Image: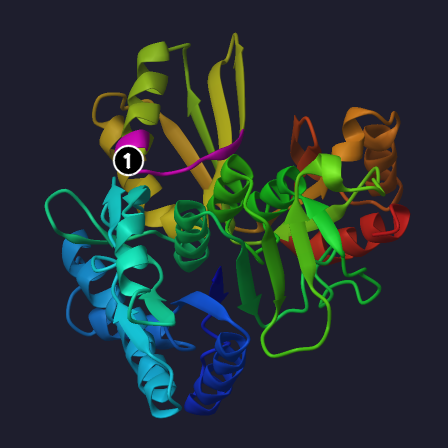
Amino acid sequence: MAQSVLKFGGTSVGDFNKIKNIAYMLKSRIDNGEQLVVVVSAMGKTTDSLLENIGTLTSQPKDEHLAMLLTTGEQQTISYLSMVLNDIGVQTKAMTGYQAGIKTVGHHLKSKIAEIDANRFETAFETNDILVVAGFQGVNDHLEITTLGRGGSDTTAVAIAASIDTSCEIYTDVDGVYGTDPRIYKGAHLLNEVSYEEMMEMSALGAGVLESRSVEIAKNYNIPLYLGRTLSNVKGTWIMPQAEILEKKAVTGVALDTHMIHVTLTYPMQNFALLQKLFDSLEEQSMNVDMISQIENQQGLQLSFTIKDSDVNQIEEIIVSITEDYPHLRYKMKDNYAKLSVIGTGMRDMSGIASKAFRTLITNDIHFYQTTTSEISISYVVDRDLGENAVRILSEAFNI
C-alpha cells in the first residue's frame, strides 16, 4: 500500500473548521488506497500565547520546562484531528514525538534529530490507516522532552519521510515557492520546481517558507518534497535534485531577512584566544552566526557577524561574560539592518551575475555595509527601511 507523509502548518490547522476540512481530505486519500503519516503544528497562535503566559510567571524559565510547555500545542492538534478522523470512520493513532520514536540530541530548545525508529510506524500501520504525529518535538537520552527549534515541524515531517523512504508534502498558507515574497513584489513568479540547494539557500537567507534543515534532510536522502497551499487546487512547487530540472535560471530568487541583528566586536589588539572563547560559547549555546567578516590591522581586531533577533539576549550574555576576561572588548548591536540575498545555481556557470547585482544596488542608491558570497548566493547588509525596495529592484532586474 502506498505511503506518504503530509505536514500541516499552524495556519492550516488554525481553527476547528479547518481541522475538519483537512480530516475529510485525508479520508479521501485513504479511500484511494494510501496510508498516511500526518505531522501537525500547534494551532495558529498557540505557541505565542504560551510564551505570553510564561511572561506573567517568570523572566528566566529553565529550558527543559519551556520545552515541556511548548510541546503541548502540537499535542492538542494531534488530539483534535484524531478525534475528527475517528468520527468519520478512519482508523487513526495520535503519536507524540516520544511515541513516534524521535530521538534527539543537543540543546533542549534547539535539538537535532539523531534517529527515528521506523518500526514504530510499521507496527502502528498494522491496525491504523493514518498516524497523526506531533511535529517540533522529540525526546533525548535522558527521556526529557525537547523541541527542534524554528520550523521544527517541517524537519519532523521530512525526517519521518526519510525513515520510511517515501515522499513528503508540506501544506501551508502559500501556493508554493515564489522567486521572492509576493507581498513585497507583486510580480513574483510561482516556481514549479526548485533545486534542493537553491531552496536551502533561500530558507537560510530569510525566505521563510521552509526550514533549511528540512530541505537538507530531503537532499541527503533524496526525498521528493512538495510545498503547496492547504486544500487548494493550485499546483505548488516540487523541490528536487538540480540535475532533474530542465530549465535553469541564472538567478532563482531574492530573499529578505529582517529578523536579524548586526553585531560588531572591536578589540585593541589581535587575539585568537578571545575569538576561540567567543566561538566556543556560541557552540555551547547552539547559536548560529552568519555573514562573518574579520579585519585585523594596526588598530587591532574587528569582527562583524549577523544573528537571528531571537538570539539577542543570548549573544549579549555571551559578550558580557567575555568582557570579564577582556575588559577592553567593545561591541555594538544594531537592529536597523536587513539581509538581502540573491540566489541561483546559475551563478556557478554564468558570468556577470555578481557585477549586475552590485551595479543594480549602487545605481539605485541602495547602500550596503557588509557583503558575503557562497557558490550560489550573494548577501548584503542594507538599511532595513530600504530592504523591500531593494527586493523589488533586484527582482525586476533578474526577472524573478
Residue 276 image position (x, y, % from top left): 33, 17
Does any portion of residue 179 appear in the rendered image?
A: no
Relative to residue 57, is residue 341 drawn left or right? Answer: right
Residue 79 image position (x, y, % from top left): 28, 79
Q: Which residues are magenta?
A: 283-291
The front one of 108 and 229 is: 229
The front one of 397 and 40 is: 40
Question: In the current view of this chain or complex, which residue is farthest to the left?
Answer: 142
Residue 157 image position (x, y, % from top left): 43, 56
- Work out whether 185 lies above or below 242: below
Relative to residue 103, is residue 20 drawn left or right? Answer: right
Q: How is the image coloured?
A: rainbow
Magenta stretch: residue 118 in it? no
- Work out whether 173 lies above or below 317: below
Residue 393 image position (x, y, % from top left): 84, 52
- Work out whether 304 lies above or below 106: above
Relative to residue 169, is residue 41 drawn left or right? Answer: left
Q: Kindly indicate the quadrant of the structure image that contains residue 191.
A: bottom right
Does any portion of residue 393 appear in the rendered image?
A: yes
Q: Kindly indicate the quadrant of the structure image that contains residue 237.
A: bottom right
* Badge 1 amino acid: Ile
Identify the residue at image location x=85%, y=29%: 355
Which structural element holds mark 1? helix
Q: Circle 1 is placed at which residue position?
A: 318
Q: Kindly indicate the quadrant of the structure image that contains residue 173.
A: bottom right
Identify the residue at image location x=55%, y=61%: 169
- Work out whether 256 lies above or below 32: above
